[in-house]
Image: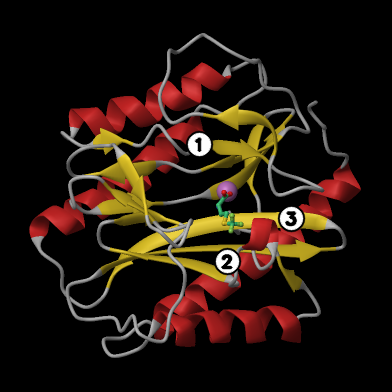
Amino acid sequence: MIFLKSGPELKAMDRANRLVHRVLSAVREAALPGVTTAELDHLAETLISEDGAQPAFKGYRGYPATLCTSVNDEIVHGIPSPTVRLAEGDVLSVDCGTIVDGFYGDAAVTFAIGEVNGEARRLIDVTRACLEDAVDQIVPGARLGDIGAAVQQRAEAAGFGVVREFVGHGVGRALHEDPQVPNYGEAGKGLQLRPGLVLAIEPMITVGSWRVRVDRDGWTARTEDGTLAAHFEYSVAVTPDGHRVLGVEE
Ligand code: MF3
Ligand code: CO
């Protein structure tokens, strides 16, 4: 079941995502070598509650934290921990969700802790470009396959892998709504986009194998071969004349 959002509903989603992006910026500034991922989670939770909003992930299917903090070979859903201390050269993916007036915001970024090697830098840059290429596809009448094909094209041209096991999704009054949004596929195929549809686009890209292993904690998803992964996410509304990235000033 697909829910198209009205103007006032998109305004609430804009607010939810604006808070998410504010949190992600603050976390990025705080993420210095020596800081633990639990400290970043505490910062995020404080900012969200000071805003009178709620963290979206905490309690979702039993997930225990406000952020997902995925380090190096961790792709997504890394659980913040007082024993995970960031070090110069790490690649950190941070995913954050909020609920504002009943609507969800959902976005993620990946960045370097201090200086990283050239391959890590390239992975981060290509994954961000995958997200931007995907967002550029979003206009009324375009199809879901156009989004996946754009991500896959950019990632594979760079020699990187596209994670299949996790996908983007519709978002609104629930964190995960229909449709699923794969990061691979064929242009011209699949559901046609319509104004009012809101999609969380979230490419997950790997240096090596795109195959995933989930830790015994039931959450932390890492690359099977131990190579680096990166993840960026925007919540994007289809508008009559194209799209709007929610929570981000143009
Ligand atoms: N952005 C991710 C998603 O949309 C984050 C979910 S974390 C969870 O699937 F804990 F809420 F599952
Ligand atoms: Co998401």
C-alpha gap between disc 1 and disc 2? 21 Å
Query: Which residue is tagged 2?
Result: 21
Query: Which label belongs to residue 37?
Result: none
**Crowding near the residue tagged with mark 1, few <14, some 14–19, many ≥20 C-alpha atoms within 10 Å:** some
Q: Nearer the viewer, mark 2 or mark 3?
A: 3
Q: Position of residue 51 (x, y in %)?
A: 76, 80
Instruction: Please tell me which residue is depicted at 17% across the width and 41% down the height of the picture.
Output: 208
Quadrant housing residue 124: bottom left
Quadrant position of the N terminus in the picture = top right
Query: Which residue is tagged 1?
Result: 167
- Depth check, front residue: 242 or 98: 98
Query: Which residue is tagged 3?
Result: 104
Quadrant housing residue 11: bottom right
Instruction: Mark 1 or mark 3: name the one nearer the start of the chain.
Output: 3
Instruction: Please tell me which residue is depicted at 41% across the width and 80% down the height of the picture.
Output: 37
Q: Nearer the viewer, mark 1 or mark 2?
A: 1
The residue type indicated by label 1 comes to Val
C-alpha gap between disc 2 and disc 3? 13 Å
Q: Position of residue 207 (x, y in %)?
A: 19, 45
In this rendering, is residue 108 above or below 28?
above
Instruction: Please tell me which residue is depicted at 48% across the width and 26% down the height of the picture.
Output: 147
Residue 152 left/right relative to 236? left
Q: Circle 2 sits in a helix, a strand or a loop, which is it?
A: helix
Q: Circle 3 sits in a helix, a strand or a loop, which is it?
A: strand
Residue 200 left/right relative to 186? right
In this rendering, is residue 166 above or below 49?
above
Q: Residue furthest front?
A: 216
- Verify CB contact (< 8 Å) between mark 1 and mark 2: no
Quadrant housing residue 180: top right
- Verify CB contact (< 8 Å) between mark 1 and mark 3: no
- Depth check, front residue: 60 or 193: 60
Residue 6 left/right relative to 204? right
